[in-house]
Structures are given as structure tokens and as C-alpha cells.
Amino acid sequence: MEIITLQSFLIVSLILFLTGLYTIVSRKNIIGIYMGIELILNSSALNFASFSRFAGRGLEGQVFSIFIIVLAAAEAAVALALLLAVFKRQRGIDADKLNILKG
Amino acid sequence: MQEFVMKYGFLLLVFPLLGAFLNGIFGRYILRRYGEAPIGLLACASVFMSFVLSIAVFLALNDSENGSRIICNAYTWLNAGNLRADAAFLFDPLSSIMILVVTGVGLLIHIYSLGYMKGDSGYYRFFAYLNLFIFSMLLLVLADNMFLMFIGWEGVGLCSYLLISFWYTEKENAIAGNKAFIVNRIGDAGFLIGIFILFWAVRQGLAAAGTFDTEGLSILSFQFLEKNISLLNGIELYGASAATIICLCLFIGATGKSAQIPLYVWLPDAMAGPTPVSALIHAATMVTAGVYMIGRLNFLFAMSPLALGIIAATGAVTALFAATIGCAQFDIKKILAYSTISQLGYMFLGMGVSAYSAGIFHLMTHAFFKACLFLGAGSVIIGMHHEQDIRNMGGVRKYMPVTFAAFLIAMLSISGIPPLAGFFSKDEILWKTWESGHHILWLTGLATAGLTAFYMTRLLVLTFFGKNRGSKKDCAVHKIKESPFSMTMPLIVLALFSAAAGFLGLPEALGGFNRFEFFLSPVFGSHRGASHESMEYMLTAASAIVAVIGIFSGVFFYLVKPELPARIAKKIRPIYNLIYNKYFIDELYSFIFVSGTGIITAVLSAFDRYVIDLTVNLSGYILRLMAHIIDWFDRRAVDGIVNSAAGITLIAGAYLRKAQTGRLQAYVMLLIIALAIGVFYKAIF
Amino acid sequence: MNIEIKEIVFISIVLLTIAPCSVVAFSRNILYSAFALFFTFIGTSGLYFFLDADFLAIVQLAVYIGGVLVLLLFAILLTKNIDDIKKTNTISLRRSITAGITVLVLFFSLFFVFLSTGWTPLNGGAAYPNGTIHELGRLILSKYLLPFEIASLLLLAVLIGSLVLAGKTVRQRED
């Protein structure tokens, strides 16, 4: 039985993705939510890389992974800047208190 | 010169129109800001420019060898199949004389009005109307075709209406304006119908000739008509010759505009307008439009001896009829108005006996002496502080010598005293009448000449001689003074013309050379009949004698024995009353037409009230009933649906807004639940 | 059943990646979560080596660990009082239950899908024993040039945008 197969990578990626999802939904702290997002981005980049490796169609999947990492970095900068702005405004970073859009 | 006229002839009309436009639009502002001077200057200048151009046209026509016509085609106005009308202007001897008279007399009267209208609040309005009138009259005279002529024809009618009711705040003036307008409309309707029939007949003629080639000319242009008038031969309408019907229809128009029986009634009332207007429009120019029109269409009228006979008879009867009324009037302007009607009758008589150049000649001399008379009367009226009744005048001679002198010359001229202008022109008409064999009409004309001399003398004597009878205005008498120079200057000029203009048309019988007739011969042709020189001498002498008799009787009755007229009037009271009340024509018209209209109106009003109103009310009631039903439906059904829709939305919103928590994670939760359901479903099945 | 050394290494790296995820998800201390994330990133980087993506692995290390994670730590330090650090990363119980159920459903569904799908045609793959940098550079500067340039613009915008956002002093609200 082969272990290093596409399935293994996909399952690792799935676990990362679902953990990220869970983290996003359950955390109260915005930084926690942000960590969940990072996990999801990681999982998707990994997914692209693995399909790139196993599909045998060149390196285009890896290029996508690179772009995802670039976007993740950009997102990190913006998200943390937003975080600081929210902190200055709310004196806290509890996501539950960010409900001024409540209907 | 000719080319200049051909190219720029239309400028003749542009100047007065421009003046009317400027004064009409900006006059109020100019009057308030700069006073009266610029307005009057502008109006006079525009007419003066036209006058200069008229002289240029006259000279150009004299220069040219054929001397017949110059056409200035400004642009094509209408073009629909065979119906084409150009805004083209026809300059020929006839129209050049007319424009000289119109702009010349018009200019003098503009100058006169500067003084006469001083201080009137409608100063700018007056001059705008007057300029507009000059424009319309020039359009009428210069028109190259019937359509354009009709525009001018209506334009002068409009200006006449505007100027008669110039002081519109007084009801009488407004009514007089209305009367003139409505009576003119009747005539104009005839004129228009005449044009229509003419167009139809020419089309028929062309069809009969089998060609529609008009050589690039409009069917209704005078040039085309003159050349192809024979097309009308054999065209019949309702069993009568088309030419006769056309001529009679056009003549109805002429009677309206030129105040002939039966449509003359508006002219005496038109004296309600300012005196310069009476002089210009209701004596010198506009009222002669009918005469001019017949002269212009002489080739057409020549085709219908019957129509010519009717015209001659109408003219002669009108002349005598109006002259008799003139003998018993006391309003200075009304006398002149009846005298105008009478003189116009002469012109129609001349036209009717195919003495076109004589008619036009009389038109011209009449323009001079009648304008002079009216302006003199206006001068007197102003001097007497708006007194118009000659019974309250008298002795004005001493206070207004210039006016008196001018008035005297004009009066002698109209009476037919040789060698003044009126004598020659009137005599020419009478001679031509005799020559054409209408001896009864000649007799009528002669009698009219006598009566004219009589009532003009009466007017002169009552106004200028004797003692002042203005009893209630004793204090005002001493303030009678001569009018300013701007008013006396036109008087003098006109008096000179009314004295001397006759020599233009000196009859050959008297050893002269009739330049006037010669000048007009391209238009009217030479009508040299058999020479009856001895007869002509006799008739000339007769008319002169009759005029002298008329004057002497006038002097006798009103100066020598002033109490005599009243005694005679008492003796022949019924006749006197008849004449004094103008033969009750106004009352007759009022009874027949106005009351007749009243009865029709009453019937129509009853119909309106009982039938139409009933229907309208019934339908209104039904509508209201239906409206109630619809209202109920609206309220219950439609509103119910709308309100319940709104209510449902409201309730749904109240529940759904709870889902909008504003919490990010709640949304993400929903998202992943949906994702899980989808993926689960896809994985299982 | 013979397990090669390569596979043992692979399994241990997979564990290094997945195990810290539970800490990220469940820890009450935000600093612990952050450090767990560090291990996850390193594990992912290792996995990239197994995928013949050497450049990607290096970038993962450099950007995520050197950049994102450091930024994250700074953010934690800037926003929270270090005293009650133990309660910095609380979990909403109600949400976590719902989320757990949903995530489990997803996991089993997708797991089933992955295993039941026949991937064999794909499993040939293409190895890059000489590294991928050359080929990646060629792709980025030819076929993906436009996205690459746009990405650079995006980074510039982010640089300015985050400066503006973080530097803005917000007026304290009255309520």
C-alpha cells in the first residue's frame, strides 16, 4: 500500500481546512478567527501543489499556490491593520461585539 | 438702377417692418428710458427710407425702355404642385405710383403724428402700428401674386382694427374697431373665395388647354394671369361665366375694404381712431386698396362687362348716397368720412367704366387732398381741445391761419374747382363715364360733384367762419392756437400737392399731355376713344359750374343766411331725419343681421341648454355613479390587496431581521451548514 | 508490509502538521494557538518537499513563518493585556457544538469521496529532480505575467491601505 499518494495529501489538506473552518466559527477572538483563515489558505495552497504534482500537467498549480501565499501575506497585513483599528475603536477584539450591522 | 430694384426691392418692405418690430418690442422701454423722440425718429426714418426707395423705383421705371415691370423675387414662399406662391414683389408703373403715395403721404402723416400724439401713453404702440400698416400696405401693393396680396390685404385690415380701437379703454372705440374688423371680414371672405375660384378656373382652363406648363410662373401671379387670362374663356360655374363670378367675389372684398355699398358702414365709425390714422388709413391709402386691386386685375375685370357695370353702378350710387349723408352730419370727421366714401365711389365709377388710369389718378389726388383735409381737421380738433362737433366751432380761421389755408386749398380741390387737382381727376372720370355711354351714371356723378362742393363748403364755413359758437368752452376759445410746425408742415406739403398734382394728368382736350395716363399705359393699355373734344369741353365746363354752384349755395346757406338751413330742415323734416340718421342703414343692418344673429343665438342657446346640457348632465351623473362603484371597489379590493401585501412584507421583515445578527460568525456558520448539506448530499448520492 | 524510511518521514511530517491544528482550534491561550500554528506551517512546508515543490516550501517558510506569524504575534501583543492571557482565546460553546457537528459531517462525506474516487490515472505524476525554480520563473514572467504584476500592485495597495487603517486615530464613541 502506497502512502505517499494524492489521497494522503488531500486528506491532510481536508483536515487543515476543516480545523480552520471550526476555528473560524467557534472563536470569539478576532485573532483566533484570523488563525483559522490562515489554516484554510494553507490547506488550499497544499491542495493546488499536490494536484500539480500528481496530475502531471506542469507547474501551473504551484504558480497558483504562490499567488495564494502572496494573497495570504497581503491579507495578513490588511487584517491585522483592521484589527488594530477595531481595537482602537472598541477597546477589545471580541467578534461578538462587532454587531453594529445588526438588523 | 433696374438691377438694384430687382435685387433689393424687398428692402422697401423691410424698413417699416423693422421699425414696427423695434417700436413694438422695445418701445415701452425706449419711451420710459429716453422719451418720445427716438420712437418717432425711428418710425419716421423707416418710412423715409421706404420713400427714398420708392423714388428710386419710380426713377428706375422711368429709365427703362420698355418701362413695364421689374420683379424682385425674395424667395419661394409656398410650393405645392401647381400651387406656388413666391414672396415676389412687382414693380410697375401702377405699383410705383401706389408706393409713392403710400410712403409719401405715410411719411407726412408720421411727421404729423409726432405732434399729434405727443404725450399719449401709447406713443410707441401707435408708431409700431403705423409702421406695421405701412408694411402691410406696401405688401398689398407690391405683391406679385394673389396670395401675397391677400396677406397684405388682411394685414392692413388688422392694422386698421388696431388703430381704430387705439384708445381701447373707451368702449365706443373698441366697438368701432370690432365693427370695422367684422365688416371687413365679410368682404375678405368674398375676396378669398374669389381667389379660390380664380385658382380653380385657371386650373380648369389649363386642363382644357391640355398643358400644365406655366413657364415657371406661379398660377396666381399677376404676370401669368395677365398673359393667360384667355384661359378663363368658356369656364362656367353654376351657369354663369367664371370670370363674372370671380370679379363679383373680388368686388365684394373691395366693397368691404373700400367702404362701398353695402359694406361701407364701418368707415364712419372708424373715425373713433386718432385723426392721423383716419387720414392715412381711412382716407388716403387702405380704403383705396379695393380700387387698386381692380386696377391691378383690370385684364380680369375686362372679361366681365357685367361685373364692370355692377362696379360702376355701385360706385355711382355710393358716391351720391354718401354725399347726401355728408350734408346732414355735424361731426367734422364723420363728414370727411362720408366724403371719403363718396370719393371712393367716384373711383369705382371710373374703374367700372374701364377708365383705370383716371380712377388711379383720382385715387392719388384724393390721397393728397383728403389727407390734407383730415390733418387739417385734426389740427382743428387739437386746437379746440378735442371738440369735433362743427356746431360748436366757428371762427377758427383767425386763430389757425395755416391750417385754414391748407384746408381751404384741399376743400377747393375736392370740390372740383379748376385748376386744382381734384378738378382734373374728377372730371376725367366723369368724362370717361360719359364717353362709355353711361349717361345716367354721369348724371349721378355730376350731382355728387355738386353735393360735394356744397357740404365741403358747409364744413369749411361752419368751422372757420363766423363767430365761435363754443358756448360751453368760452374760456377755452382764447387758448385756440396754431398747431406746432411738425403738424403744419405736412399740411402745407399736402395742400401744395392737392393744388398742383392735377397737372400730371392734364386732359389733352385742354391742351395738355396726360403724363399720368401715359405712364400707366404699360399696365392699362391705351384707351384712346374717339375724340369728342367739343363734348369734352362742355362736360368739363358743366362740372366746373356745378362745383361753383355747390360752393355758392353752401356759402349762401351757411354764411349769408345761417338761419335758413334749420328752416328748410324743419320743412322737409322726414327727409332730413332720414338723411341725418344715415338712411337708417345701421339700424337696418343691426335689425337684420344683429337681431337675426340674436334669434339664431337664442335658438342655439335653448338647444344648448335643454338638449346638450341635459346630455352632458346625464352623462355626468352616470359617471358619478360609476365613480362611486369604482371607489368602493378601489377601497375594499385594490387597497386591501395593496395593504395586505405591505402587511405581509412588514411581518416577514420583522421575523427576518432577527436573522441579520450583525455577527460575522453566524453568517459563516450558515455558510458551512449549507456547504455540509450540499457536500453530504453529493457524497451519498 | 514494508514501510520505507521515506514513508516514515512522511507520516511524521503529516502528524507534525495535523496535531498542532487541535491546539490552534481548542486552546484557551492565544499564544499557544500562535505557536501551534508555527508547527503547522513548518509541517506544511515539509509536505511541499514531498510534492517536489522546493521553491514553494521555501516561500512557505519565509512568508508564513517569517512574515505572517511574526505579524500575528505583534498583533497579539498590541491588542491584549498579557495578564489574563489564559482567557484570551475563549470559545463560544453553542457555536462550537454546531460547528463541530457540521465539520464532522463534512469530514466524513469528503473522506468517503476521496477514498472512493479513482485517482489512479493521475497518480503517474511528474517529478522535478532538478528543482522547479527555473520553470516557475519562466511561467511567472511569461504566461502569468499580468497576474504577477497585478499582485505587485495589490501588495503596494495593501502597504498603503494598512498604514492608513492602522495609523488612523478613531474618535472614541460616546456610548
Image: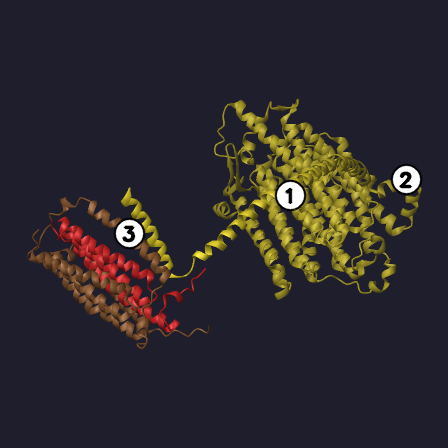
Chain colours: A red, B yellow, C brown
Q: Secondary structure at mark 3?
A: helix
Residues at discs 2 and 3 both on one chain: no
Instruction: Tell me the residue at 23%/58% (across/down).
Output: A16
Mark 2 residue type: Pro
- Residue B375, percent from left and from top: 72, 54
1 vs 2, front mark: 1
- Crowding at label 2, few (<14), some or many (≥20) Cα neighbours within 10 Å? few
For label 3, the residue is C106
Name the mark nearer the viewer: 2 or 3.
3
Which residue is depicted at the point 32% across and 47% down?
A: B678
Question: Image height check: is B128 above or below C90?
Answer: above
Q: Are marks 1 and 2 on the same chain?
A: yes
Residue B255 visible at all = no
**Number of the front mark, 3 or 1:** 3
- Closer to us: A3 or B558: A3
Q: To which quarter of the image does residue B487 belong?
A: bottom right
> For mark 2, what is the residue?
B574
**Disc marking residue C113:** none
**Is residue B260 shown left or right of residue B301?**
right
Residue position for label 1: B631
How far apart in space, not on screen, are marks 2 and 3 (Cα)? 129 Å
At a point 71% along the width and 58% down the height, the residue shown is: B116
Asked if the residue at tag 1 contacts the one at tag 3, i.e. Cβ–Cβ closer than 8 Å, the answer is no
